[in-house]
Each structure stands twice: as structure tokens, then as C-alpha cells.
Amino acid sequence: MAMLRTFTRRVVIASHIAVVILFLLACANGWLRPDHWWVVSLLGLFFPALLAAVIFFLVFWLLYRRRWALLSLAALLAGWQNIHAFLAFHPGAAFQASKPPHSLRVLTWNVRRWDEFSGKKKDNGLHRSKMMQVIAEQNADVLCFQEFFESHNPKEYARNIPYIQEQLHYPYYYFSQDYHRYDWMYETGVIIFSKYPITGTLRVKYSGTDSVRATESLIAADINVSGQRVRVFTTHLQSVLFHSRDFRNIEIIRNVDDSVLQASRSIVKKLRRAYGFRSAQADLVRSQLDQSPYPVVICGDFNDIPNSYTYFHIRSGRQDAFLARGFGIGRTYKDLSPTLRIDYILADPSLEVLQCRRLVTPFSDHHPVIADLRLGEQGQ
């Protein structure tokens, strides 16, 4: 009996040490380039589970009054920056529909081409009008959309840009037009709409093969807000390019079917490629942000989690609006996992984040994020 107790204790201690090592590696993910350390980047996807395991061991050892609890405590302290990026700690911070005075309301949303081509939803033809209604109700000053779809064939699809300009009252816009049909009848890309005048624009196209149509340009609009200028960026970084077969592979992995090894290889291959693309894209975005002569707001679909290299490299001293005024995990992507926050609004330190919310909707595969920002002295 004593031998069994000793063996069990050693197994528990070894498991604890292994969990802490993996947790710290997942935390290091934010500072290691994923094109070189892609294995660590993959480990970062399991950060929520590893965090829960570290907390479990902390509670376990505290109940038994063992000093091993200090190991978990030390790991949590070492990983605090990652924990804080993962969780927002502002309970009860209700979002007020009325905008605070002297503030700029920004909305970002990956609209998935207005669900025009979604075969999963029976009433997808009605989604566009409902999505437009949701946008109108938010009363934002600046709209940033990813996977924006514009049709020049009114017989098939309604025009979106004129509708937003005239019906929603956003007269100013800048559109990247990243992809189009051979006859320019249809276009997609990222776009910025503004109620305030746009005095300058910028577009940076990411390098890479044209056959990988899962990324959109980095664009910026210099917006004149009552005499103060703010440079608003939006972008859509490299997607993993999961298709229906990949989602089936994920189910195989979850259910531990016989073909789990083959399914895992397929998923890892796509993840590794996406990490490589986003690593270079994050570097490019960071350089453009650092060159801005005006206070910066960058928002969009980064396709990466809060403890990733992409997130920490782009954020770099800027405020995450959700962390500043939100609460919880703030999931923005509906599929795969309940912990995926991959859509962000990041603001210059000179801009005060007044409030932020994630708006849960049944449309698109992303939830929109909205934030109110007060302009500071540097915006003049």
C-alpha cells in the first residue's frame, strides 16, 4: 500500500512538472517567431487547457498543504502577461448605446461576404439586410470590414458600398479590392467607412502566392475628427484555410478514430503554413504602425489568438480595447473552439478606451467588436 501511494505521488508530481513546462512554453509562444518555432506555436493553441491544468494543480496541492503549490503559483506569475491577454477582468462593465462626448466609435467585423455564398443557412438571402440593420443600430463613426463583398451586377446581388454611403450615412470610404472576377463584376477585400472626412489613404499588399486567397491587404485611412487626425488601419491576416474535410479531420482527432494520425498531419501542415505567412505579415504591419505620424487604431481579423507572436508583435504597447473594458474570453470566431478571440481593436496609448463590447450575432462566422475611444492631446 505504501509503495502504491509513493508511486501515485511520483506520477502526480511528474505530471505537474510536465504541465508547468508545457504551460511556460505556450506562454513563450508570444515572443518566438512561428516560422522558426512552429511547434511552440501549435502548443499555444492549448494555452486555455494548460492554464486550467496549472490552476488545478495549484488547488490540489493547496488542499494537501504541499509546497508543490509554489510551482503552479510561480508558473502563473511568470505567465501573467499571457493570462491577462487571454482574459479581460472588467465584470459589470455594461456597454452604453449612447456615445460618450468627444469619442470615436469604431466597429470591426469580418462579414464573410455578407453570407451571400453560405450554403449552410436556409435564409442566407436575408442575411445581408439583417446585417446592415445590426450595423446601423451600433451608430459607429468608423466601420472596418473584412471579407467585404461588392457586386456590380444588380441582377444578382445588391450594391453594398452605395447602400452604406447613402442609407447608413458613411460618405467616405477606402476599399482594397484585393480579389475580383476577371470582368470586375465582383470584388472582395477589406474596407474602411467613415462619417468623418478621410484625408489620406494607404494600402500595403502582402507578398505570397496568388493561389492562397486567404489574406487581404493592410489598409489605412487618415480620418479628420473635428480637427484631430487618427490613422485607422484594418487588415485580414492569413487564414488557416480549413475546408469541410479539415473540419471532419478535427472531429476524427476529437473522437480518436483509427485515422487520427493522418488527420493530425493534415491539420498540422495547414497550421504550420499559416503561421509562416502570419509571421511575415505581423512584421510588416508592425513597421507600418510604427511609421504613422498620427495616433493609430488597428482592427481586424488577425486569425491568431491573444498569446501568439502575431498578437503581441502587432500590439506592442498599444491598448487592446477588449482587455481595457471587456470581461471574459471574448470569443469572436464561432467555429472550432469557444476560446478563439481572433478579431481585435488595438488603440494608441494616447487614446482612452471608454468602453468595448463583442456583439453576438447569428450572422457570419465572426462576431463584431465595437469600442469607444476618446481622442487625446496627441491627436491634434
Image (cartoon, rainbow, N blue to C red):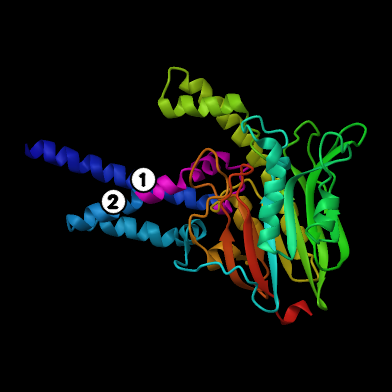
Q: Residue furthest right?
A: 183
Q: Which residue is mark 1?
A: 19
Above or below, 218 relative to 185: below
Residue 110 seen from this side: no
In the rendered view, does 357 fall on the left or right side of 163? left
Magenta segment:
30-52
Residue sitting at x 50%, y 45%: 44
Residue 213 x %, y % = 76, 35
Residue 239 x %, y % = 66, 39
Residue sitting at x 73%, y 82%: 377
In the rendered view, does 125 fall on the left or right side of 369? right
Whichever of labels 1 and 2 marks the residue nearer the N terminus, that label is: 1
Residue situated in front as seen by the camera: 31 or 270? 270
Distance from disc 1 to disc 2, alpha carbons, whole Å, reads 9 Å
Q: Residue furthest left?
A: 1
Q: Which secondary structure lies at badge 1?
A: helix
Residue 82 x %, y % = 49, 57
Q: Is residue 51 magenta?
A: yes
Q: Which residue is mark 2?
A: 57
Residue 247, picture quadrant = top right
Closer to the observer: label 1 or label 2? 2
Above or below, 106 relative to 255: below
Above or below, 113 relative to 311: above
Residue situated in front as seen by the camera: 117 or 124? 124
Residue sitting at x 86%, y 34%: 155
In the rendered view, does 185 fall on the left or right side of 363? right
